[in-house]
Image: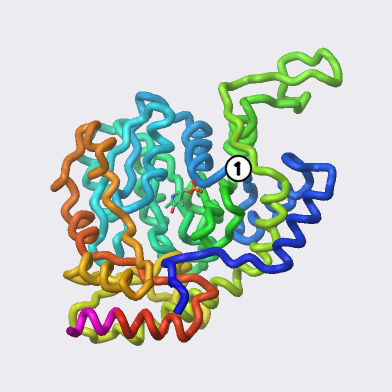
C-alpha cells in the first residue's frame, strides 16, 4: 500500500490545462484570472466581495491592516489553530489574547470569550478571530452579538471550511465567509486545504470600505484609481497612500483555483462521505472519541461541516501515531496549542493557561481525509486504528 498522508491535493488534467493556457497568455502575474477567481469565489461563499492574495497568512495580515490593528489593539483568538490566525495581529503590533476552547467541539468557546471581555473595561478589546476548526463552522451569531455589544470586529478564519455552513436562529443556512456575521473572512489554498493553488489565499467581505482597503494594502498601498487620488499628473500617475505590501497572487494560480473551485462541491461530498464511514466505524468503540459536530437536520443534509480534518481523540495518542506511521499511515496532530509555542511563551503565556486546549492536544489525531482517499485505503486506516486501540 502507498503511503497515506492526512491530507493531499487533487490535480486533474483540466487543472493542468488551465495553468498551461494562462502560461501561454500575456499575463504571468496580474491578469483576467484574478478577478474571475475572486468573483467565482465570492459567489461560491455568498459574499459581496473577495480579494485574492498570496496565501492565507497574507490574508490574515491584510485583515489586520484593513481593520487598523495597532499596538493598542487586543485581539482574542483560539489556541487550537494554525499559528497564522494569531500572527496576523502580531504583524501589526497588536496583542494576541488567547481564550480556551469548548472541549466537545474544540472551537473557541463563546461563553469564555464573553467572560474575558466582561472582565475588562469597555474598549479594552478590539476584535475576535474565531476559527472554523477542522471544517466545523463556528456559529457566528452569538459572536456577532457579543462583538456588537462591545464594539468589536469579527474576522472568521475559514481556512478549513470553504463550502461549510451553520444554521442561524432564523433557520437560514449561513455559509462560511459569506460576510453576514463576520466583518471579514479568510481562506487558504495551501495543498492540504480544499482548494489548492500551491500558495494562495482569499479574503471575503460584504463591506465596500474594507474591500477598498484590502485592495490598497495588497499592492504596496498604491492606487491608480483617479477617483481615489489626491492629485493626477497624467496617465502614468499613481499614489502610494498607505504602507502596503506585495501580497498579490499570480494569474496562473488563479486559473488553477478556478478549475479547482469548479470541483469544490464534489470534493466536499466526498469528504462528508469519508467522515460518515469513520463515524460509523468508531461509534461505540471504547477508547476512541470523536469531536462533536453541529447536527443540522434542516435542508435534508446531515451537517454543514466541511471536513478539512477528521479528528479522533485517544488516550495513547503518541502510541497510535507511531503505530500508524509504521504502517505508512501519516496521521497528524492539529494543533500544538499556539500559546505553548516558544514565541507566545516569550510574550507571557505558559503551559496550564488553557486546560481544555491542552487536554485536547494531548489526545487529538487527524486521520487521513481528502477526496481521493480510496475505500480500500480508508478501510486499512480504520483497521489499523482499531487494532491499536483494542490491543
Ligand atoms: C492554513 C491555515 C492558515 C494559513 O494559510 P497559508 O495559506 O498556509 O498561509 C491560516 N489559518 C488556518 C486555520 C489554517 O489552517
Mark 1 sits on what residue?
A: 53
Residue 380 or residue 99, whichever sits in front: 380
- Above or below, 306 relative to 181: below
Residue 390 shown in magenta: yes
Q: Main secondary structure of the magenta part?
A: helix
Magenta range: 385-391
- Above or below, 344 relative to 139: above
Residue at 78 percent across and 24 percent down: it is 226
The kind of secondary structure element at disc 1 is strand
Specify the color scheme.
rainbow
Q: Quadrant of the C terminus?
A: bottom left
The answer to whether residue 254 is visible is yes
Residue 367 or residue 103, whichever sits in front: 367
Residue at 38 percent across and 32 percent down: it is 90
Residue 102 or residue 86, whichever sits in front: 86
Whole-percent x, y for residue 232 in the image? 79, 15
Q: Is residue 7 left or right of residue 233?
A: left
Q: Dot 1, crowdedness within 10 Å: few (<14), some or many (≥20)?
A: many
Amino acid at each position: 500500500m502507498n503511503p497515506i498522508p492526512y491530507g493531499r491535493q487533487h490535480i486533474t488534467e483540466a487543472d493542468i490545462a488551465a495553468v498551461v493556457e494562462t502560461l501561454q497568455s500575456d499575463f504571468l502575474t496580474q491578469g483576467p484570472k484574478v478577478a474571475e477567481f475572486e468573483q467565482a469565489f465570492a459567489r461560491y461563499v455568498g459574499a459581496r466581495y473577495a480579494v485574492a492574495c498570496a496565501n492565507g497568512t497574507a490574508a490574515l495580515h491584510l485583515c489586520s491592516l484593513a481593520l487598523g490593528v495597532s499596538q493598542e489593539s487586543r485581539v482574542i483568538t483560539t489556541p487550537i489553530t494554525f499559528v497564522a490566525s494569531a500572527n496576523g495581529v502580531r504583524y501589526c503590533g497588536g496583542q494576541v489574547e488567547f481564550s480556551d476552547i469548548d472541549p466537545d467541539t474544540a472551537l473557541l468557546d463563546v461563553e469564555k470569550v464573553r467572560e474575558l471581555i466582561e472582565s475588562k473595561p469597555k474598549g479594552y478589546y478590539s476584535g475576535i478571530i474565531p476559527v472554523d476548526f477542522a471544517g466545523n463552522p463556528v456559529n457566528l451569531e452569538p459572536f456577532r452579538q457579543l462583538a456588537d455589544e462591545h464594539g468589536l470586529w469579527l474576522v472568521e478564519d475559514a481556512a478549513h471550511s470553504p463550502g461549510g455552513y451553520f444554521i442561524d436562529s432564523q433557520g437560514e443556512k449561513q455559509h462560511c465567509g459569506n460576510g453576514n456575521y463576520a466583518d471579514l473572512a479568510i481562506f487558504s489554498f495551501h495543498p492540504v486545504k480544499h482548494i489548492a493553488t500551491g500558495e494562495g489565499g482569499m479574503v471575503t467581505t460584504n463591506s465596500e470600505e474594507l474591500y477598498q482597503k484590502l485592495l490598497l494594502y495588497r499592492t504596496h498601498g498604491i492606487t491608480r484609481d483617479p477617483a481615489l487620488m489626491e492629485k493626477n499628473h497624467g496617465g502614468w500617475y499613481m499614489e502610494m497612500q498607505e504602507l502596503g505590501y506585495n501580497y498579490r497572487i499570480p494569474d496562473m494560480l488563479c486559473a488553477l483555483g478556478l478549475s479547482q473551485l469548479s470541483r469544490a462541491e464534489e470534493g466536499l461530498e466526498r469528504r462528508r462521505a469519508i467522515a460518515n464511514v469513520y463515524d460509523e466505524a468508531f461509534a461505540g468503540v471504547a477508547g476512541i472519541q470523536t469531536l462533536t459536530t453541529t447536527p443540522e437536520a434542516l435542508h435534508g443534509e446531515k451537517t454543514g461541516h466541511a471536513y478539512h480534518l477528521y479528528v479522533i481523540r485517544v488516550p495513547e495518542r503518541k502510541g497510535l501515531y507511531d503505530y500508524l506511521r509504521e504502517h505508512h499511515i501519516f496521521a497528524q496532530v492539529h494543533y500544538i496549542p499556539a500559546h505553548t509555542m516558544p514565541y507566545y511563551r516569550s510574550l507571557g503565556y505558559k503551559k496550564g493557561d488553557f486546560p481544555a486546549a491542552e487536554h485536547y492536544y494531548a489526545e487529538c489525531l487527524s486521520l487521513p481525509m481528502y477526496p481521493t482517499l480510496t475505500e480500500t485505503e480508508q478501510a486499512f486506516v480504520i483497521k489499523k486504528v482499531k487494532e491499536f486501540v483494542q490491543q
